[in-house]
Amino acid sequence: MKKLFVVVIIFMCLFLISCADIKNKISINGNGLGTAKLEITISEILLSLDPTIISKIKDETIKRGWKVVKEEKNNIVLETKFKNISQLNDEYMQWTFASKKKEFLTRSYFLEIKLIKSIGRELFFYELYVKMPGNIDETNGIKISSSEVKWNLGSFNEGDKLFVKSSGSVIFNFIAPIILIFGIVLLFVIIIIMNRKT
């Protein structure tokens, strides 16, 4: 009877509190390159049921190309860099990023995240943060700054799509090559003038 009571209490705790808190922070550049940082904190209850869970998470994410930044008893922080956002695709989420010319010296950016499979929202508190290039124009998430948006995945279902649209100036991308060429020409002219004086 006492064991049954303990088991019932554990299951009630599992459903009343989350077994893990997950924060996934993505930062995307205008060219589609970026970084992802994943922080997972495991509850003491889950840790007591499976003391090896952190090492299992570590092993699985390392296989997928992530690097461990910090590891503690009930917490692990991982990072990865990507050349294409689709490198973050897994059995739970499908990522798509697009960039196109909007106006002269302005580009628009679009990110869509399709939730393919349930992450177990009853057991996990999962927050997803995305920092976009430029300023956010539209999203179905919570805008937390001019370029960053957040979603709590517990309020979404399998098949739902998260999205964010942003736009930004590409003046630096346009002017930088001109300044570089001008600097090289100016340096070349200075060298010619110095050689003529000697």
Image (cartoon, grey):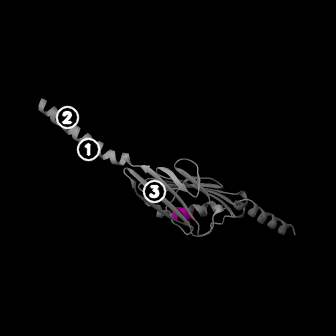
Type of amino acid at the residue the image marks with label 1: Ile
According to the image, label 3 marks what residue?
109
Q: Residue at x 77, y 66 (%)?
A: 11
- Residue 72 lies left or right of residue 32; in this view the side is right
Q: Helix, strand or loop at disc 1?
A: helix
- Residue 30 lies left or right of residue 197; in this view the side is right
Q: Quadrant of residue 15?
A: bottom right
Q: Residue at x 49, y 60 (%)?
A: 111
Q: Nearer the viewer, residue 13 or 113?
A: 113
Type of amino acid at the residue the image marks with label 2: Ile
Residue 198 seen from this side: no
- Residue 121 lies left or right of residue 78; in this view the side is right
Characterize the local packing of mark 1: few (<14), some (14-19) or many (20 or more) Cα atoms within 10 angstroms.
few
According to the image, label 1 marks what residue?
181
According to the image, label 2 marks what residue?
190
Residue stretch in magenta: 59-63
Q: Of callouts 2 and 3, which one flags the residue occurring earlier in the amino acid sequence?
A: 3
Residue 89: x %, y % from top left: 51, 66
